[in-house]
Amino acid sequence: MTDIFPSPELYKKSYPKNIKWDAHIPVYPLYGMLDNAVKKFGDRPAFDFLGFKMDWKDIHEQSLRLAKSLQDRGIGKGSRVGLFLPNCPYFLIGYYAIARTGATIVNFNPLYSEKELMHQINDSGTSVMITADLELLHGKMKKMFGHTCLEHLVVCSFTDILPFPKNVLFKIVKKKELAIVDKDDTVSWYKDLINHHLDPKPVSIDPVNDVALLQYTGGTTGTPKGAMLTHQNIVANAEQCAMWLTGMTPGQDRMLGVIPFFHVFAMTAVMNFSVLNALEIIALPRFELEATLKLIHKKKPTCFPAVPAIYNAINNHKKLSKFNLKSLKACISGGAPLPVEVKKTFERNTGCVVVEGYGLTESSPVVCANPLTGVNKAGSIGLPFPNTIVEIIDKDDKKTPMKVGERGELCVRGPQVMKGYWNKPEETANVLKDGLLYTGDIAIMDEEGYIFIVDRLKDMIITNGYNVYPRNVEEAIYAHDAVEECIVAGLPDANRGEIVKAWIKLKPGETVTIEKLKEFLSTRISPMEMPKQVEFRDKPLPKTMIGKLSRKDIVAEETAKKH
């Protein structure tokens, strides 16, 4: 065996004994996961939303009824239907109903601005949107008519999925949060659409080629674009997760869903993985620290995918010892690099192993992860998933395979890799070459096949001609006991090209000077990596909707100061 890539033999030898790299991955339509779940576990709990509960039979029947109503409106192959919802049962039901019609699902971020929504609706050609009667959502969608190709809203009653007395109290206490919904031809109520028979017309699906989902992303570069994920892309990634996360018992284990389903990480690692294994999803509409801790303490979920910032927030809760978190047996970190200190602290606090994984929208999203059993290397994104080939390619010539331990661009080949970008052939050609996805991430692979992300190409800082990788500097800063959060990025500089700046939030009650911090870092990073500017902040650093620290937003804040 050579140490030149590609060669899956390098990482196959490190696989846990109960996982096969070349395992068979079945091919079937996306909605087949829900059909299989209800056949085996129809009476088992499926969804617990703020105490409102549904079993798998309930979910399946409502999804069939909704699919039939969508078909009656002419929705089918060639249609795009949007989901504009928080985490709730409606999201899961709508997602699988749309897939069953043969139409393409389009996920929308509820916090998008009107301008961003208009762009995505028109770019995707979304004609029908499933949303809720919350002013935050419905209020935005009403404004889309006449400015976009949107033709119809399916409106779901939020209070219908709240248990008594929350459903009554919400109408009284939070009445202003409920929207006034127009009664005209542009609106249908969800409860009316499922109030009939449940026999949608069968649709012929080609899982390998038919696009099930447009998942919007900035991609490796540029403006938001829709990654075309086929039925098989999504099914394959859920099946790969099931092969990897050994120890989960179908129909028995419970999934904590606090990261948003519209994001590709939660869509696969929380929602679809749960459907495939008939795990009960215990969900919150959005992440709130106190509510999440209370939920774990009371409901005792066993699986908890999250972004590093969420694990870090839990680590730093002042009264963490009040909560029993011992039910957790699998925590999967994704969406952003997991600092080693955050991982170790969370594991000490909970007794649960945290495995870091890696993925991107264009790969449905999971490419690789550390195993739950076997070697779990801190700082590594682990081993490639079954049937997934990872190549480390020269970042400059885009052709030459790198040797073990050498830096290069991480490239992926596997059944979860997207079909391409929606209506963007040139951008597709830039990142997909003969089925190989060029991720834009810089990585190394060690002699055991474990992969370590160094950084993103677009985030790399070039100062005086020297390459500085923000993640390396962030890891060093997180090693300081006083640090709660940090972001490192490059800022323009007339003399050096760019300089390294660090934004830091300290833990409550902690103090440290810039001089003392630099003294601490001096043995951990090189002089070229040492931040030239350090800014301490009292408030939490900016985060994205999914909860990961946002380098983009903090750089934008810095740029705005100078204009």
Image (cartoon, rainbow, N blue to C red):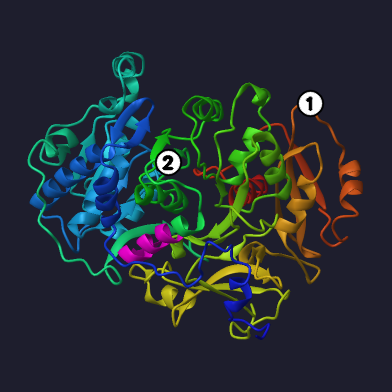
**Residue 231 located within the stretch drawn in magenta:** yes
Q: Which quadrant of the figure contains the N terminus?
A: bottom right
Q: Give the image location of residue 31, x and y in percent.
A: 26, 55
Mark identifier at residue 563 = none
Question: Judging from the image, what secondary structure is the residue with disc 1 in?
Answer: loop
Question: Residue at the spot x=29%, y=43% of the render?
Answer: 41
Q: Amino acid at mark 1?
A: Gly
Overall secondary structure of the magenta stretch? helix
Q: Are marks 2 and 1 in contact (CB under 8 Å)?
A: no
For residue 499, side relative to residue 380 (left or right): right
Question: Residue at the spot x=32%, y=59% of the render?
Answer: 213
For residue 384, side relative to residue 153 (left or right): right
Q: Residue furthest front?
A: 17
The residue where tag 2 is placed is 111
Image height check: is 434 above or below 251?
below
Residue 502 visible in the displayed image: yes
**Which circle's residue, 2 or 1, is located before the other in the chain?**
2
Part of the protein shown in magenta: 225-240
Q: Between residues 222 and 540, which one lies in front from this camera angle? A: 540
Q: Give the image location of residue 333, x and y in percent.
A: 57, 49
Mark identifier at residue 509 = 1
